[in-house]
Amino acid sequence: MDSQILPFIIYLIAVTVTPLLSSAAPATPCQSNCGSLQIKYPFGTGYGCGSPRFEPYITCKSNQLLLTTHTGSYLITAISYKDSTLTITPSAMSTCNSMQQSPNLGLDWASPFQLGPSIFLLLSCTPPTSSLTIKGSPVCDPSSTHLCATIYTCPAVVNLSLPLFPPTNTCCVYSPANFNSKGELDLREMKCKGYASIASFQDSPTDPSKWMYGVTLKYTNGGFDDYYMNNKCNTCEDSGGICGYSPPTNSFLCICNSGFNATTDCYNNYNPVQDYEDLIGTSTSLST
Protein backbone atom coordinates (compact mmCIF):
# COMPACT_ATOMS: atom_id res chain seq x y z
CA MET A 1 0.00 0.00 0.00
CA ASP A 2 1.20 3.53 -0.79
CA SER A 3 2.87 4.95 2.36
CA GLN A 4 1.12 8.31 1.77
CA ILE A 5 -2.38 6.82 1.50
CA LEU A 6 -2.25 4.68 4.68
CA PRO A 7 -1.79 7.57 7.16
CA PHE A 8 -4.77 9.32 5.54
CA ILE A 9 -6.90 6.19 6.09
CA ILE A 10 -5.77 6.05 9.74
CA TYR A 11 -6.75 9.71 10.17
CA LEU A 12 -10.25 8.98 8.83
CA ILE A 13 -10.62 6.10 11.29
CA ALA A 14 -9.57 8.31 14.17
CA VAL A 15 -11.95 11.17 13.43
CA THR A 16 -14.79 8.68 12.89
CA VAL A 17 -14.29 6.43 15.92
CA THR A 18 -13.36 9.04 18.55
CA PRO A 19 -16.69 11.00 18.57
CA LEU A 20 -18.63 7.74 18.73
CA LEU A 21 -16.70 6.59 21.77
CA SER A 22 -16.99 9.91 23.61
CA SER A 23 -20.74 10.23 23.00
CA ALA A 24 -21.44 6.71 24.22
CA ALA A 25 -19.44 6.90 27.43
CA PRO A 26 -21.17 8.22 30.58
CA ALA A 27 -19.88 11.52 31.98
CA THR A 28 -19.32 9.87 35.38
CA PRO A 29 -17.60 6.46 35.76
CA CYS A 30 -20.16 3.85 36.80
CA GLN A 31 -19.43 1.70 39.84
CA SER A 32 -20.82 -1.64 41.02
CA ASN A 33 -20.57 -0.59 44.68
CA CYS A 34 -21.14 2.56 46.72
CA GLY A 35 -19.59 2.13 50.13
CA SER A 36 -20.85 -1.23 51.45
CA LEU A 37 -23.89 -1.34 49.15
CA GLN A 38 -23.94 -3.36 45.94
CA ILE A 39 -25.29 -1.24 43.09
CA LYS A 40 -27.35 -3.01 40.47
CA TYR A 41 -29.94 -1.92 37.93
CA PRO A 42 -32.10 0.16 38.15
CA PHE A 43 -29.78 2.11 40.48
CA GLY A 44 -26.59 3.79 39.34
CA THR A 45 -23.78 5.83 40.83
CA GLY A 46 -23.94 8.80 38.46
CA TYR A 47 -25.09 10.29 35.18
CA GLY A 48 -25.41 7.64 32.49
CA CYS A 49 -25.48 4.79 35.03
CA GLY A 50 -28.45 2.61 35.88
CA SER A 51 -31.88 3.73 34.70
CA PRO A 52 -32.55 7.30 33.52
CA ARG A 53 -35.75 7.25 35.59
CA PHE A 54 -33.78 6.71 38.80
CA GLU A 55 -30.69 8.80 38.06
CA PRO A 56 -32.16 12.19 39.11
CA TYR A 57 -32.88 10.82 42.60
CA ILE A 58 -30.01 8.40 43.36
CA THR A 59 -26.36 9.46 43.61
CA CYS A 60 -23.16 8.13 45.16
CA LYS A 61 -21.19 10.82 46.98
CA SER A 62 -18.18 10.17 49.22
CA ASN A 63 -19.04 6.44 49.20
CA GLN A 64 -22.55 7.16 50.46
CA LEU A 65 -25.65 6.34 48.41
CA LEU A 66 -28.18 9.14 48.70
CA LEU A 67 -31.84 9.60 47.77
CA THR A 68 -32.65 13.24 47.01
CA THR A 69 -36.21 14.61 47.02
CA HIS A 70 -37.74 18.08 47.29
CA THR A 71 -37.45 17.87 51.10
CA GLY A 72 -33.78 16.89 51.32
CA SER A 73 -31.15 14.18 50.78
CA TYR A 74 -31.35 10.94 52.75
CA LEU A 75 -28.76 8.22 53.33
CA ILE A 76 -29.69 4.83 51.88
CA THR A 77 -28.62 2.11 54.31
CA ALA A 78 -30.11 -1.03 52.73
CA ILE A 79 -31.41 -2.27 49.38
CA SER A 80 -33.40 -5.42 48.68
CA TYR A 81 -33.39 -6.09 44.93
CA LYS A 82 -35.53 -9.17 45.50
CA ASP A 83 -38.32 -7.20 47.22
CA SER A 84 -37.76 -3.94 45.27
CA THR A 85 -37.33 -1.94 48.48
CA LEU A 86 -34.73 0.34 50.01
CA THR A 87 -34.30 1.82 53.48
CA ILE A 88 -33.36 5.43 54.16
CA THR A 89 -32.28 6.89 57.51
CA PRO A 90 -33.07 10.64 57.58
CA SER A 91 -30.59 12.46 59.80
CA ALA A 92 -33.41 14.35 61.56
CA MET A 93 -35.40 11.20 62.37
CA SER A 94 -35.67 10.24 66.03
CA THR A 95 -34.43 6.95 67.49
CA CYS A 96 -34.30 5.60 71.02
CA ASN A 97 -30.80 7.04 71.46
CA SER A 98 -31.39 10.39 69.77
CA MET A 99 -34.67 12.31 69.60
CA GLN A 100 -34.99 15.68 67.91
CA GLN A 101 -37.43 17.96 66.16
CA SER A 102 -37.83 16.95 62.54
CA PRO A 103 -38.68 18.75 59.30
CA ASN A 104 -41.19 17.28 56.88
CA LEU A 105 -40.26 14.11 55.02
CA GLY A 106 -41.39 13.83 51.42
CA LEU A 107 -41.10 12.08 48.07
CA ASP A 108 -41.43 13.55 44.59
CA TRP A 109 -44.64 12.43 42.89
CA ALA A 110 -42.77 11.95 39.60
CA SER A 111 -40.22 9.63 41.20
CA PRO A 112 -40.49 5.83 41.06
CA PHE A 113 -40.65 5.63 44.89
CA GLN A 114 -43.49 5.29 47.37
CA LEU A 115 -43.81 4.51 51.05
CA GLY A 116 -43.24 0.91 52.03
CA PRO A 117 -44.32 -1.02 55.15
CA SER A 118 -42.62 1.18 57.75
CA ILE A 119 -44.33 2.03 61.05
CA PHE A 120 -44.26 5.74 61.84
CA LEU A 121 -44.41 6.96 65.43
CA LEU A 122 -45.35 10.64 65.64
CA LEU A 123 -43.76 12.05 68.78
CA SER A 124 -44.46 14.96 71.12
CA CYS A 125 -47.83 15.77 69.55
CA THR A 126 -50.49 18.05 70.98
CA PRO A 127 -52.73 15.75 73.08
CA PRO A 128 -54.93 13.92 72.68
CA THR A 129 -53.66 12.21 69.54
CA SER A 130 -56.85 10.15 69.41
CA SER A 131 -58.45 13.23 67.85
CA LEU A 132 -55.72 13.59 65.20
CA THR A 133 -57.34 13.38 61.78
CA ILE A 134 -56.47 14.02 58.14
CA LYS A 135 -59.41 15.05 55.97
CA GLY A 136 -61.71 13.96 58.77
CA SER A 137 -60.28 10.45 59.10
CA PRO A 138 -58.40 9.30 62.25
CA VAL A 139 -54.76 8.52 61.57
CA CYS A 140 -53.62 6.89 64.84
CA ASP A 141 -53.82 3.14 65.32
CA PRO A 142 -55.33 2.56 68.80
CA SER A 143 -54.32 -1.11 68.77
CA SER A 144 -50.61 -0.21 68.72
CA THR A 145 -50.38 2.32 71.55
CA HIS A 146 -48.00 -0.07 73.35
CA LEU A 147 -45.32 1.04 70.86
CA CYS A 148 -45.69 4.59 72.15
CA ALA A 149 -45.31 3.45 75.75
CA THR A 150 -42.24 1.43 74.74
CA ILE A 151 -40.36 4.17 72.89
CA TYR A 152 -41.26 6.70 75.59
CA THR A 153 -39.09 4.69 78.01
CA CYS A 154 -36.05 6.06 76.15
CA PRO A 155 -34.38 8.88 78.13
CA ALA A 156 -33.93 10.81 74.87
CA VAL A 157 -37.58 11.94 75.12
CA VAL A 158 -36.35 14.94 77.15
CA ASN A 159 -34.83 16.32 73.93
CA LEU A 160 -38.40 16.75 72.63
CA SER A 161 -39.32 18.82 75.71
CA LEU A 162 -41.08 15.82 77.22
CA PRO A 163 -40.63 14.58 80.81
CA LEU A 164 -39.41 11.05 81.41
CA PHE A 165 -42.25 8.55 80.90
CA PRO A 166 -44.60 11.14 79.37
CA PRO A 167 -48.27 10.35 78.76
CA THR A 168 -48.75 8.25 75.64
CA ASN A 169 -51.55 10.50 74.38
CA THR A 170 -48.77 12.69 72.96
CA CYS A 171 -47.68 9.88 70.63
CA CYS A 172 -49.39 8.49 67.53
CA VAL A 173 -48.75 5.18 65.77
CA TYR A 174 -49.33 6.22 62.17
CA SER A 175 -49.66 2.93 60.31
CA PRO A 176 -50.29 2.50 57.47
CA ALA A 177 -48.78 5.91 56.86
CA ASN A 178 -49.42 8.10 53.85
CA PHE A 179 -48.22 11.41 52.48
CA ASN A 180 -50.38 14.46 51.85
CA SER A 181 -51.13 16.08 48.49
CA LYS A 182 -47.62 17.62 48.50
CA GLY A 183 -46.08 14.18 48.90
CA GLU A 184 -45.01 14.92 52.48
CA LEU A 185 -45.35 13.75 56.05
CA ASP A 186 -46.45 17.16 57.36
CA LEU A 187 -45.53 17.19 61.04
CA ARG A 188 -46.46 20.83 61.55
CA GLU A 189 -49.97 20.25 60.21
CA MET A 190 -50.39 17.30 62.59
CA LYS A 191 -48.89 19.37 65.45
CA CYS A 192 -46.11 16.92 66.22
CA LYS A 193 -42.48 17.80 66.84
CA GLY A 194 -40.75 14.66 65.61
CA TYR A 195 -41.12 11.15 64.31
CA ALA A 196 -39.46 7.76 64.45
CA SER A 197 -39.84 5.15 61.74
CA ILE A 198 -39.41 1.46 62.52
CA ALA A 199 -38.16 -0.69 59.66
CA SER A 200 -37.77 -3.81 61.84
CA PHE A 201 -38.16 -4.79 65.49
CA GLN A 202 -35.10 -7.07 65.19
CA ASP A 203 -36.81 -9.79 67.31
CA SER A 204 -36.94 -7.33 70.25
CA PRO A 205 -40.43 -5.78 70.19
CA THR A 206 -40.13 -4.51 73.75
CA ASP A 207 -36.61 -3.06 73.53
CA PRO A 208 -36.58 0.12 71.41
CA SER A 209 -32.79 0.38 71.72
CA LYS A 210 -32.52 -2.71 69.48
CA TRP A 211 -35.05 -1.69 66.83
CA MET A 212 -33.84 -0.94 63.32
CA TYR A 213 -34.92 2.61 62.55
CA GLY A 214 -35.43 3.72 58.99
CA VAL A 215 -38.04 4.49 56.34
CA THR A 216 -38.73 1.64 53.94
CA LEU A 217 -39.56 2.70 50.39
CA LYS A 218 -40.82 0.62 47.50
CA TYR A 219 -39.65 1.31 43.97
CA THR A 220 -41.25 0.37 40.68
CA ASN A 221 -39.75 -0.05 37.23
CA GLY A 222 -41.47 1.47 34.23
CA GLY A 223 -41.91 -0.07 30.80
CA PHE A 224 -38.45 1.09 29.73
CA ASP A 225 -36.84 -0.52 32.77
CA ASP A 226 -38.78 -3.78 32.52
CA TYR A 227 -37.86 -4.23 28.87
CA TYR A 228 -34.15 -3.76 29.36
CA MET A 229 -34.03 -5.57 32.69
CA ASN A 230 -35.55 -8.69 31.17
CA ASN A 231 -33.82 -8.61 27.81
CA LYS A 232 -30.44 -6.96 28.23
CA CYS A 233 -29.46 -5.94 31.74
CA ASN A 234 -29.15 -9.41 33.27
CA THR A 235 -26.92 -10.50 30.39
CA CYS A 236 -24.85 -7.35 30.74
CA GLU A 237 -24.31 -7.81 34.48
CA ASP A 238 -23.54 -11.53 34.02
CA SER A 239 -20.77 -10.54 31.60
CA GLY A 240 -19.20 -8.25 34.21
CA GLY A 241 -20.71 -5.06 32.84
CA ILE A 242 -22.77 -2.33 34.47
CA CYS A 243 -26.11 -1.32 32.99
CA GLY A 244 -26.45 2.28 31.89
CA TYR A 245 -27.78 4.51 29.15
CA SER A 246 -26.56 6.89 26.48
CA PRO A 247 -28.00 10.43 26.55
CA PRO A 248 -29.84 12.08 24.93
CA THR A 249 -31.78 9.13 23.48
CA ASN A 250 -31.28 7.13 26.71
CA SER A 251 -30.61 3.98 24.69
CA PHE A 252 -29.31 1.00 26.65
CA LEU A 253 -25.56 0.62 27.25
CA CYS A 254 -23.55 -2.15 28.83
CA ILE A 255 -20.59 -0.38 30.43
CA CYS A 256 -17.56 -2.68 30.41
CA ASN A 257 -14.35 -2.80 32.43
CA SER A 258 -12.35 -2.04 29.32
CA GLY A 259 -13.68 1.51 29.46
CA PHE A 260 -15.82 1.10 26.36
CA ASN A 261 -19.47 0.27 26.00
CA ALA A 262 -21.57 -2.29 24.20
CA THR A 263 -25.22 -2.45 23.25
CA THR A 264 -25.65 -5.96 24.67
CA ASP A 265 -22.86 -7.39 26.89
CA CYS A 266 -19.12 -7.39 27.54
CA TYR A 267 -18.38 -10.95 26.42
CA ASN A 268 -17.13 -9.85 23.00
CA ASN A 269 -16.14 -6.33 23.99
CA TYR A 270 -12.92 -5.08 22.48
CA ASN A 271 -10.78 -1.96 22.72
CA PRO A 272 -10.93 -0.02 19.43
CA VAL A 273 -8.18 2.33 20.62
CA GLN A 274 -5.86 -0.66 20.92
CA ASP A 275 -6.82 -1.71 17.39
CA TYR A 276 -6.08 1.81 16.23
CA GLU A 277 -2.68 1.80 17.99
CA ASP A 278 -1.90 -1.58 16.46
CA LEU A 279 -2.76 -0.15 13.05
CA ILE A 280 -0.49 2.84 13.63
CA GLY A 281 2.30 0.45 14.59
CA THR A 282 1.73 -1.47 11.38
CA SER A 283 1.74 1.78 9.42
CA THR A 284 5.01 2.84 11.00
CA SER A 285 6.69 -0.43 10.17
CA LEU A 286 5.37 -0.28 6.62
CA SER A 287 6.59 3.27 6.19
CA THR A 288 9.93 2.31 7.57
Image (cartoon, rainbow, N blue to C red):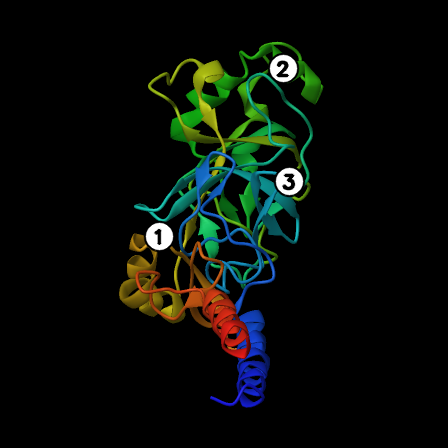
Picture coordinates of residue 67, whole percent (x, y): 57, 47
Picture coordinates of residue 241, whole percent (x, y): 38, 56
Q: For mark 1, what is the residue?
A: 240
User: Could you tell me if residue 213 is visible in this image?
Assistant: yes
In the rendered image, the quadrant that contains the C terminus is: bottom right
Q: Distance between the residues labelled 2 and 1?
A: 47 Å
Q: Which mark is residue 206?
A: none
Picture coordinates of residue 59, whole percent (x, y): 58, 50
Question: Quick check: marks 1 and 3 in contact, CB under 8 Å?
Answer: no
Q: For mark 3, what is the residue?
A: 187
Q: Nearer the viewer, mark 2 or mark 3?
A: 2
Q: Quadrant of residue 124?
A: top right
- Local crowd at mark 2 within 10 Å, few (<14), some, or many (≥20)? many
Question: Quick check: marks 2 and 1 in contact, CB under 8 Å?
Answer: no
Secondary structure beneath label 3 = loop
Q: Nearer the viewer, mark 2 or mark 1?
A: 1
